[in-house]
Amino acid sequence: MTIANLWVVLEPAENGFTSTSLELLSHARTIASSVAGVTWGTGNTQATLAGEYGATTLFSVDVPAQALPGAAVAAAIAGGELPDLVLIPTSYDGRDIAGRLSARLRRPVLTNATNLSADGHTEHQIFGGTRLVDAHFTTPGVGIVVARAKSFVASSSGGAPATVTPLAIPDLGRRGESSITNRHVEEQTGPKLEEASVVVAGGRGIGEVTGFEIIEELAELLHGAAGASRAIVDAGWVPYSLQVGQTGKTVKPDVYIACGISGATQHMVGMKGSKVIIAINKDADAPIFQMADLGIVGDVKTVLPALAAALRARSK
Amino acid sequence: MNIVVCVKQIPDPSAPQSLDDHHNLNRLGKLLLDEADTYGVEMALQLAEASSGEVVVVSMGDATDLTGLRTALAMGAARAVVVSDPSLRGATALDTAAVLSAVISSVSPDLVLTATESSDGYTGTVPAQIAEFLGWPSVTFAKSLSASENNLTVSRQSEAGYDEVTVSLPAVVSVTAGVVEPRYASFKGIMAAKSKSVEVKSLSDLGLTLNQGQAISAVTEAPSREAGEKFVDDGTAAEKIIAFLESVKAL
């Protein structure tokens, strides 16, 4: 397949679009001759930003403010003339749109892509990123690809504002019967996890919920952000927003410090792109040591307080 | 409230994984109930118990070893339906959703619960695909949910925190781990599960043909990260970490 027409789903965010959306849009213009964005909500006012990153057209879907966008955006895309491929960010709403679009059009969807070439082939990491899968669509029709955060670099093309074109939502039947009644924003201090240059992450080895305090303190001392493995998120010790990994956030900091994290596949996928990795774990055979630039076989409960004390002493 | 929970039997995630000649995940060893599914099963049991409803588990996959499904039955689900067909080996997420939707339609529940994604294939699109096939609303990434007369109130994960969402029934909801604490099956439950109905259906029983439409061209080794130095902590770990942070100019 050759991708002439490529649409990128641009997810609205506070200051325009999510960073993953802009990464995908930046990549799209390097592989396709015609690139359009599809957005909704506050994204509909971002023609300048969409154009700057490479979209010539911005399709705007008039999703009601309190509605979940998945069903409406998918139906709007499916209802018109289709491009060769729709590229969608891996996110909560992105996966809803992809799933809905796929079922609506009876077209398969390739998920967790870390690359997309001009011939429509996708790259996916499996087994904790130790193997790369090259996949493609085998039947004619629109391709649907969901790509992971930080797979591409966002860069401005300096393009002119995109032309905004409304995309109508057909009758959704019962599909649209959901509404957001309240939005809760979790308080956050320091740099955002996905953007921090240093990430200090805690796993099961921190022992108990209070063990996360030292993780947060170290993150603060190193002007970084605290992260977590799925194990301690599942245990309810920290909120899901701190989860690094397959189901959580993808991070690529300069320094990643894995504390009491064994290095399950699920976790590795989210942090293996870090520039350097420091691992502290009691188990000398923990898989995390296979990718650590500095491995400390030791108990986080003694190593971390000593490290925090040394860092505090330096900052005085 | 009658509830269907979609579950999957997966190879032991702590065992080494490999691919077969067709680039499909080897499923030769023992299959377990995906731990991610136990949260949906527990949630369904709690909602059904509060409303004198029934929980049916629906699955797709090899039916020669049903230990994983028996785990869900031992927890308290009433019965199971599994679609098993050689042609479903390596099925796409779309075909999986079409198969599960066909079974769900025949059960016609008030609610379908799923995990956010399976722990082996992790496409994460199946819940939305099922909802679209059924023509139902859906809420994915639920971290808590409560039922009232004809709708559910769901706390849904968001990038910034969480949203409270109301959804009318019937609906599809995917739940995150941690939505509830899954119960351990009791001895009584394990014994009872042995005599519960597990209906095995083929693709032709459902009158479905597969869509397919995607393939793997190649699987290659990823460039590996070289492991660096490894020390056993002798009390100087903090110094070593600080020296290392200085060497990479992080301090």
Image: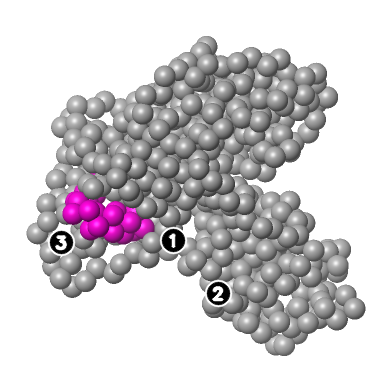
Instruction: Give the image quarter of residue B226.
Output: bottom right
The picture places residue A194, in percent across and down from the top left corner, at 69, 51
Above or below, A229 relative to B203: below
Question: Could you tell me which quadrant the C terminus of chain B lies in?
Answer: bottom right
- Residue drawn at (56%, 65%) of the image: A238
Decide which of A235, A15 is in the foreground and name it: A15
- Residue drawn at (73%, 22%) of the image: A47
Labelled disc at residue B178: 1
- Residue drawn at (56%, 32%) of the image: A65
Q: B31 left or right of B138?
A: left
- Contact between marks 1 and 2 (CB within 8 A): the answer is no
Residue lying furthest right: A316
SS class, disc 2 = helix
Q: CA distance from mark 1 to mark 2?
A: 15 Å
SS class, disc 1 = loop
Q: Can the viewer see residue A230?
A: yes
User: What's drawn in magenta, residue-wise?
Assistant: B38-66
Labelled disc at residue B193: 3
The picture places residue A118, in percent across and down from the top left corner, at 63, 24
> What amino acid type should be assigned to the residue bearing mark 1?
Gly
Above or below, A94 relative to B164: above
Above or below, B234 relative to B204: below
Q: B73 left or right of B155?
A: left
**Chain of the residue where label 2 is placed in the rendered structure:** A
Residue lying furthest bottom: B235
Residues packed near mark 2 inside 10 Å, few (<14), some (14 to 19) or many (20 plus): few
Q: Which residue is disc 2 drawn over?
A: A209
> What amino acid type should be assigned to the residue bearing mark 3?
Ala
The picture places residue A92, in percent across and down from the top left corner, at 53, 42
Residues packed near mark 1 inside 10 Å, few (<14), some (14 to 19) or many (20 plus): some
